[in-house]
Image (tube, rainbow, N blue to C red):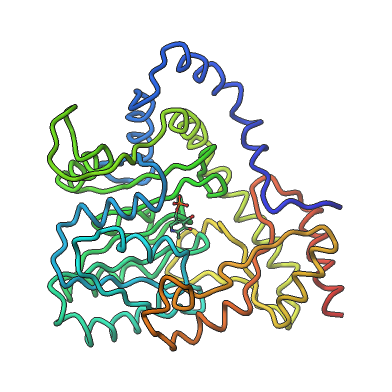
Amino acid sequence: MEIKFNDISKQWDVIKEDVTPKLNLLFQNSDFIGGKAIAEFEKNFADYIGTKYAIGVSNGTDALKICLASFNLESPCGVIIPANTYIATALAITYLSNLNSELKLIDCDIYYQMDVDLLEKCLKENRKKWKSCVIIPVHLFGHPSNIEPIMELANKFDCIVLEDSSQAHGAMVSNKKVGVFGEMSAFSLYPGKNLGACGDAGIITTNDEVLYDKAQSLKNFGSREKYYYDYRGWNNRLDTIQAIILNEKLKYLDEWNEKRIEIAKIYNDLLDNLNTIITPKTASYVNKNVCHIYAIRVKKRDELQKFLRKNQIPTIIHYPIAIQKTTPFQYLDVNDNKNTLQYADELLSLPIYSFQKEEEIKYITDIIKKFYL
Ligand SMILES: Cc1ncc(COP(=O)(O)O)c(C=O)c1O
């Protein structure tokens, strides 16, 4: 059986009848930049997440960068992120060339989220030396970070919180969706995400009108009115074609998330009794883990990955090289973050997407069992 890691074409099968006439109309009107589909998607996404505003942008990395640039951060500025995340979370601050920033990496807990005790320790040790401070929790793998205690610490230590919700569209804590907790939240809409465009795209959410206005301006050269500029901004607009597609896909996001949750449960049921495998767990503070990635932890990970590949089962490692070991961030000279380093050697993400069939999951888990026999 040939298995796909993700099959996004299945989403296209669902939306194409509704999307095609809209795309035809767009081509007829040639309303390609800043068309009305963008404002529509921004409104629909803000309503879905539960914020007052949303700002469509070019991708998730630019979303993070624009949020950081909206905050009026003062140098020296501390930027605290989880050690185990996609590199974009760390790169975002490096694009603000006028800011003197110090990046701090916090190790992850058993749910692969920023460890709150270590965050508190970092703030106690460092907050006083910084004029401003941003904490960027990442809701990794579809599982929310422990965001409420993080918000309390942010309050206590006078920090801004920027959620990186790129992997957790629709995930919930205390009956609220991630993306409503921090001052701003950045979402990637990369094709493979739970809500994914047909190319690069991203979106920002916020309840703050001033931040909303600034982010709308920054993503459009620093301008809210054509040829009048308030900031040195970027060309980081959301593409109108993507907005049309995303508007359609958003209608199915909850349904598709529920399917992922079902699939993760089937995986757990089939793998939980194997003592060689640590399956993903959901913390008790979580209302909804949207299972963006299904990552197991195993010994002999690389051998297992090869064995699966030989059996036509693709897998991915999120992430094989911890940020502190990547070339751009080696200068940090960080050697701790024990969990992150260990998990980089043990994590293996199995195929998961909303249209996966139960027999495929059974096949994958049978091959895994065969490897460990
Ligand atoms: C946690 C996280 N942050 C940021 C990004 C960057 O998003 P993009 O690829 O849309 O720039 C991604 C995804 O790629 C991500 O997974």
> For this rendering, which residue is in front, 155 or 215?
215
- 156 left or right, relative to 178: left
Location of the C terminus (image quadrant) = bottom right
- 113 left or right, relative to 50: right
> For this rendering, which residue is in front, 14 or 245?
245
Q: Is residue 101 above or below residue 362?
A: below
Q: How many marks?
A: 0
Q: Is residue 54 above or below residue 261?
A: above
Please name the residue shown 46% across and 28% down the image: 241
Determine the image quadrant of residue 232: top left
- 205 left or right, relative to 322: left
Q: Residue 295 in the image: state x and y as whole percent.
A: 62, 67
Q: Residue 144 in the image: state x and y as whole percent.
A: 44, 63
- 185 left or right, relative to 171: left
Please name the residue shown 65% across and 63% down the image: 316
Q: Residue 372 in the image: state x and y as whole percent.
A: 82, 79
> For this rendering, which residue is in front, 364 or 69?
69
Determine the image quadrant of residue 45: top left
Q: Is residue 304 above or below residue 122?
A: above
Please name the residue shown 83% across and 51% down the image: 2
Farthest-out residue, top: 28
Q: Is residue 369 above or below residue 211?
A: below
Q: Residue 117 in the image: state x and y as whole percent.
A: 34, 83
Determine the image quadrant of residue 145: bottom left
Please name the residue shown 40% across and 85% down the image: 334
